[in-house]
């Protein structure tokens, strides 16, 4: 319970728009897309700018008041869900987007801007912000940075870490660090921004960032293919890379069961019938529309001739590209419909993906025959998503499913997070992918930068090391 | 002076091949390419593997014995030059290079392997390690990681930080951390490898790494152009980016004085006569030789028509491409010939580069009219190199030249290092590009990870904060 005096000071500092308490605190502040339900916070602090956020943190730090920062609350590991006694800091009022610097090819944004708002603004100025994920309409740049978001186009452009040129963050005690630098290269001492990227708000709160942009492609093509075996997907990817065709911007595989579950509940007729082993969504973006389309057709022709793919359909227009993606992003609807449900985000060497998925899905289906479980993911990056619904009613299945998924991950030398992060839900499985020595260094960094442990306590670092 | 007992223990641990002392210590261990002369170390420690290095560090840590790690000693900021009382740890015996993993597109190497040896080995297997710099034959992967090396192809492939998938390092006390993971994406907790990349051996010593490879391009073209003004270079780069032509792998500008100095001392006749304001070396690599060459010709034709370039010559073959690059890399010969000489590595927003270079060169030439000073650099990345020779005899000019270069850097909001790092030579200028708060965090990280300060003490962090 926060002290009344601290709350009074925060209320005075933030004003009526910036300080919500009691009935003003909407239940949405208590949860995220993981389905984790937290405690309704006593207050939601909504600073207007970096200076106010710094003052908020200085007050909380002095009072040893734990807080958790929130962006769009679209995380899947419960990282932004408030625990008992935590106040919420929401960046939702800090959403300004600067003009594109065309020479430096950068845009400077506040952390609370949504990904989609930034994508659309830079596109109007002829540039591409390459980060893209299903939650684009709600997730924020600050959350994308804090979690080192991945998504659909990592294959070509990298993760959020690769798109941040510089950033400004506030430390636990209210110290503002970093700056908004537009230089491409900067080796002046330790690269401190790396501390804040992917540390899920536990080492500081990102307030603003300079993002690297790409030229806006003028061609956009996509194909949906069926494959009889998984190794064909890897061979097709190698073929594409070997001929250096470039332009590939997504390489997503959906296991047959996933495809069927999505298309049979959808309203439109599917582009390819369900019932095949694997479905591949392959997307290209380029700068030479007719030649790019031809290249895709040629490559698919070669793949058909080599029996790598069984069937393929190329999208005729942007609407059809959107329809392909709607199938891939149909997971959101499954997540919402199949409760309880448990989502996983495993990263593996390419040649281990299929065997890993097979062994986990087999064990899960044997144990929960009334349930449903699906595999799909960013296979071009070696990142597999699994979603397991053990059947209605079995709300206690989570830890047993976790055990299967994470024990196999350890056995396969996989990472238990490709892109979602660790948050609360994976915290106590971190040792499946990290040595005790590594976790100790994480805990050491945490206690060094936030010695009072007020920033998102209990996230990322396992209780055994905290 | 290291204690005799420690030296005995190290000698026993490392054996005759691994422990050099007295006359066995070659003078080369006392300097690097910066020209900084250090002290000849009492002993050079040459561990055979990670385990031996860990044991070496554990002994040194227990004895509070300062050490400095050395790769190829090609650094330009004195970081690897031993100071009084330091022992040298050389990674020169740890140079094995694993086979390429073609599916994961990675290679695993030991830190002491030279860049060129890795480049050549992966090329034989059909892949490209994109990092490339003039020191390729001597510099090592460990040094490239420790300094976050940049070089000729950052524009297209990024810096060394972008090429490291995972690494293993040894901390000051001998703890081995990290691992050799081949996954593309890995968000399992804090990304600890970032601590060791670019921290110049002050937080740990990198022993092995998994590097990300690219498909080996099949086309390679280069053009050398003259430009009447600098803004034309930026316009040409924008033109290239706008049409999304891709394939650009280097965009290097040499100011007229640099070009003249290099070509008039060279043995061959220059591809273009000296006397112009700027010379641009533009390189492309692709996968479609005739089309890639045609694209380059078309773009240069447009640039000529738009008066962006005054004259251009396209290399007819690889030998001519090599001749263009020899001019750009002619700086090594100038560095060796013009003594004393001072090298700088400034990173700026693109539209500030020319004005910055102009003001610095003007001041330097006014003050040292008998000297020579040159500008050139990776302009596609906003990274300007300056080399100042104040004239023969004026060995004390360094601090006065530094003052001009760094004061102007601060005024222009530049970084005092794009790629060379900070080391010893730039340490006390770090505050030109970093706030006191940032430097404090660097010092805090250093004291947290190396509480006894035995790893490369006195590098990176200014004396005022150490």
Image: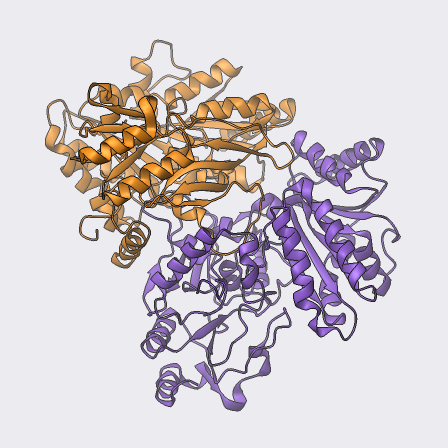
Chain colours: A orange, B purple
Q: Is residue B456 above or below residue B192?
A: below
The one nearer the camera, B184 or B351, is B351
Residue beneath the point at 39% across and 48% down: A195
- B281 with respect to B458 (left or right): right
Image quadrant holding the C terminus of chain B, namely bottom left
The one nearer the camera, A133 or A331, is A133
Residue beneath the point at 45% across and 17% down: A322
Q: Is residue A445 above or below residue B57?
A: above
The one nearer the camera, B228 or B159, is B228
Question: Where on the picture, by quarter, is residue B77?
Answer: bottom right
Q: Position of residue B111 (x, y in %)?
A: 47, 65
Q: Position of residue B202 (x, y in %)?
A: 44, 65
Residue beneath the point at 42% across and 69% down: B455
* Residue B220 can be seen in this image: no
Number of labelled discs?
A: 0
Q: Position of residue B176 (x, y in %)?
A: 33, 64
Question: Where on the picture, by quarter, is residue A218?
Answer: top right
- A170 with respect to A131 (left or right): left
- B409 with respect to A319 (left or right): right
* Residue B143 can be seen in this image: yes
Q: Position of residue A346 (x, y in %)?
A: 31, 40
């Amino acid at each position: 319970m926060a002290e009344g005096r601290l709350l009074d000071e925060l209320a005075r500092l933030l004003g009526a728009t910036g300080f919500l308490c009691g009935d003003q605190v909407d239940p949405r502040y208590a949860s995220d897309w993981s389905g984790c339900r937290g405690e309704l916070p006593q207050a939601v602090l909504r600073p207007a700018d970096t200076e106010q956020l710094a003052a908020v943190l200085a007050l909380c730090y002095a009072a040893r008041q734990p807080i958790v920062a929130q962006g769009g609350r679209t995380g899947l590991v419960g990282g932004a869900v408030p625990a008992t006694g935590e106040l919420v800091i929401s960046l939702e009022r800090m959403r300004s987007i600067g003009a594109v610097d065309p020479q430096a090819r950068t845009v400077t944004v506040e952390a609370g801007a949504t990904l989609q708002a930034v994508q659309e603004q830079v596109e109007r100025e002829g540039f591409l912000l390459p980060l893209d994920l299903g939650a684009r309409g709600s997730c924020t740049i600050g959350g994308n940075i804090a979690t080192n978001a991945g998504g659909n186009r990592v294959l070509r452009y990298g993760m959020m870490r690769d798109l941040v040129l510089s950033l400004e963050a506030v430390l636990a005690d209210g110290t503002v660090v970093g700056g908004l630098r537009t230089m491409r290269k900067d080796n002046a001492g330790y690269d401190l921004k790396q501390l804040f990227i992917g540390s899920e708000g536990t080492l500081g709160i990102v307030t603003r960032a300079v993002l690297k942009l790409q030229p806006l492609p003028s061609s956009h093509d996509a194909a949906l293919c069926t494959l009889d075996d998984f190794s064909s997907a890897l061979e097709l990817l190698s073929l594409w890379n070997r001929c250096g065709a470039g332009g590939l911007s997504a390489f997503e595989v959906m296991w047959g069961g996933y495809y069927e579950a999505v298309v049979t509940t959808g309203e439109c007729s599917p582009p390819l019938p369900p019932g095949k082993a694997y479905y591949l969504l392959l997307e290209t973006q380029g700068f030479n529309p007719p030649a790019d389309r031809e290249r895709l057709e040629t490559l698919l022709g070669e793949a058909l001739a080599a029996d790598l793919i069984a069937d393929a359909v190329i999208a005729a227009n942007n609407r059809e590209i959107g329809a392909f993606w709607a199938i891939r992003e149909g997971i959101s609807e499954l997540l919402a419909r199949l409760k309880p449900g448990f989502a996983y985000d495993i990263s593996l060497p390419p040649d281990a993906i299929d065997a890993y998925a097979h062994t986990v899905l087999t064990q899960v289906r044997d144990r929960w025959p009334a349930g449903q479980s699906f595999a799909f993911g960013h296979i071009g990056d070696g990142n597999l998503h699994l979603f397991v619904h053990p059947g209605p009613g079995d709300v206690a299945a989570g830890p047993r499913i976790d055990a299967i998924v994470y024990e196999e991950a350890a056995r396969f030398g996989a990472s238990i997070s490709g892109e979602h992060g660790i948050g609360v839900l994976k915290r106590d499985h971190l040792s499946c992918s990290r040595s005790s020595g590594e976790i100790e260094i994480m805990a050491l960094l945490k206690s060094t930068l936030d010695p009072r442990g007020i920033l998102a306590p209990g996230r990322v670092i396992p209780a055994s090391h905290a």
